[in-house]
Image (cartoon, rainbow, N blue to C red):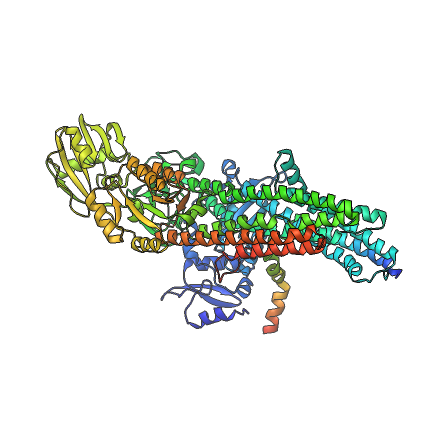
Amino acid sequence: MDILYLLVPLSVALAFAIGAAFLWSVRSGQFDDLEGPAHRILDDDDRQRETADRDQAH
Amino acid sequence: MTTDSPTLQRVRAHAASCYHCGLPVPAGARHRVVIGGRARDMCCAGCAAVAGAIVGSGLESYYEKRDRFPESPREALPDIVGDPRVFDNPEVQAGFVAEPAEHEREAALILEGITCPACIWLNESHLCRQPGVKAVHINYATRRATVRWDARLTSLSAILASIRAIGYRAHPYDACALEAAQKRESRGLLARLAIAALAMMQVMMYAVPAYIASAGSMPSDVSSLMRWASLVLTVPVVFYSASGFFSAAWRDLRARRLGMDVPVAAAIAVAFLASVRSTLAGAGEVYFDSLTMFVFLLLGARYLELRARQKAAAYLEALARAAPAVANRLLNFPLCLNFETVGAGSLVAGDHVLVRPGETFPADGRIEQGDTETDESLLTGESRPVRKHEGDSVVGGAVNRAHPVVVRVERVGEQTILSAIVRLTERAAHARPRLQEIADRVAVRFTAGVLATALAAGLWWLLHDARQAAPVVIAVLVVTCPCALALATPMALAVATSEMARRGLLVTRGHALEVLARADCFVLDKTGTLTVGHPVLQNVRLLRGSREEALMLAGALERSSEHPLARAICAVARDAPAATQLRSAPGHGVEGVVAGRRLRVGNARFVAELAGDSTGVPAPEAGEQSVWLGDEEGPIAAFGFSDALRPDAAAFVQRVRSLGARVFLLSGDAQSSVRATARTVGIDEWKAAQSPQDKQAFVKALQAEGATVAMVGDGVNDAPVLAQAQVSIALMSGAALAQGAADMVLLSGRLLDLAQGMQYARRTLRIVRQNLGWAMAYNVVAIPLAVTGSVTPWIAGIGMAGSSMLVVLNALRLARPGRKHPLLAFGD
């Protein structure tokens, strides 16, 4: 049971870390647009990739 | 090579369709652009230019990414939007451009024409490659772009032009304070809610072992450790998440009121202090789990309510955005058509402006030259274009759809219909519904009772079993939490109000919904209410003089009148001179002097009075409205008008009747025409030739019999009777004054929407009653249980939450079925 003395405080610290991270993300506006980034991540603009695609197609 | 989504491929399978926009390529068109190594057919020069610009800036892969066609650039020809260079003017920029650093500018833009995520990508990448552009961010949900640029290297007009080059339209967006405040509010609440949720979950983890452990099976140091951990996690909940409840309770107490937040704050404080004491002492009960859950559930309910409220405000935002930033002022009309582009705010009444197709009318005015079609869908919910001819009035905020027109500005800024609607909506957003005031008053007494009960129960238990005192007090405070009571009404009203605005019925005063639901008498005006309100001159019956002279004299008198019949005369009498000594007798007519002759225009009696006798006034023909013109020698001519009935007038009357309400028709028009209208739409009780005072007296008499009167009207002379009725509904086409006096504005102009609104209001009231009934019944059962100590605080918390959730979900039933739920749809 001694491990609880480590785990319980650790879980508290973790909860605080998560809370702080969430607060930061709310403040920096990450919850204002929930759709855009999901699309944007697929759209990384990479010309080399395009060339590679074209090469493959040939 | 490029690969298309199946939809696009299907369209492509049809031989000649434009590679860019998907429209058929006209025979003989010779527009080709090389995309993906192949020459592609384009339907027009516009598409070719856009596609060329896209390929030219190396963004060819747009064609792979997209899953929908863009709008055809033919609808967005670059030159119809006007000279963008005006946006470089610091004065014009003042509203929407910020200066985050030296030489740096940041503007909020609205992007139009975005159909799929690929459009966002295309715009962002394209803009990023423009010289001088530092950062671009486009919000997918709101179609709003934030662009930051170096003022030394580029200009806003160049940025707008580059967006236009790839086929989209961008215009500056005046980020109003309203939106910023909303964002802050919902962000703050979201953060509080999330912190409470996080703490609740974690505290529950520590609490569960204590609940399931049999007595003595958990070492006391472990249980103490759990308590300390819970305490540490609860501190942010109490001091951050719940801080709103404390400050609200403090505000209430200082104002010597008892609000809903007082028992909430008391419950949180008592639970927290008792738990801290137990933790420090290492013995006794702790309520951290109940406490965090309680705060989380309360905040959750408030967040839902906030979203419902902001949904309703989104409409207002769209309206506020409708007014354009710039206008084309004609310098020397009618001599020439040269114009300068000025900020819309600097227009004054009497200016002539050129409004080209695709542009928005900058102010209310009258078309001086040209015929066109306008789109007023944002203002009225009417999606069909409205035909406008020379002499017709146009509303600022409407969009010119067909041809360029010259408009003489009549009302600007605050006086326009658009800003009247914005003001009314704002007023509605701030008004406190009477139903809610009643609920609040009940809740105050209820709150006082709860506090007294908790205190008495606490004292009693302190004397008999001191260990039970704290849990009983907390259980009483939590279980009775009046939030179900407090949520019952506002939730239902918020959902109902926004739902109704979407259907074209704007609620501008708090009590309107409730009274509309209870209304048992509908009093209708005729002109503009049952009829379309655009009478046209049908015939002129001359007693003496010529037709042209009669029209000219009548036009001179009626030129400044807002009355629809006056408008109809002026539409025919184009170049009437100005009359002097104008005096208007509301409900009767206008008197004035034209070229030395004293004249009157109005109803038969009013005109005959000028000559001193009422002989020689022939009766008007059945079913026709008429206006007389006369001088001191007697009547000169009678003008006959006809006004089409609204297509849904009869259906509306029938519907309202079937809902158990009586329908009356009161009109200032002559007997015969009112009788004909009443017969057509099926109204048995009608009165003709009513002055505004008569109408008001009639409504007063109805009210004396105990009736709840809903007045549907339009026009300036309806203002007194609109104010007299318990609930008044003005039609959008009515004069601004009438709308100011009205509790509701029927923006759509469809009477059936009003009948539907009434049914909807009844449903809302029913749901509010169910909610209040439930909240009461729940408390009647729960309070005795809590007082006797048979409810632990955490069961109390769940009971409270269950009852609040039931109330919220019940209110959400008011949202339109079969749609994505408005509260669950984030963003848009």
Q: Residue B437, how many percent across, how many down?
A: 52, 42
Q: Quadrant of residue B363?
A: top left
Quarter of the N terminus of chain B within the rendering: bottom right
**Observer-nearest of A47 and B77:** B77
**Observer-nearest of B491 and A28:** B491
Q: Residue A4, how many percent across, how many down?
A: 85, 59
Please identify the residue farthest to the front as the structure is shown: B464
For residue B597, above or below residue A22: above
Q: Residue B621, how many percent across, how many down?
A: 15, 45
**Observer-nearest of B537 and B548:** B537
For residue B635, above or below residue B322: above
**Observer-nearest of A42 and B123:** A42
Q: Is residue B140 visible in this depiction of the protein?
A: no
Residue at image position (45%, 60%) is B48
Q: In this view, does B704 lie to the left or right of B316?
A: left
Q: Is residue B187 visible in this depiction of the protein?
A: yes
Q: Residue B70, how many percent across, how many down?
A: 47, 60
Number of labelled discs? 0
Q: In this view, does B234 lie to the left or right of B338?
A: right
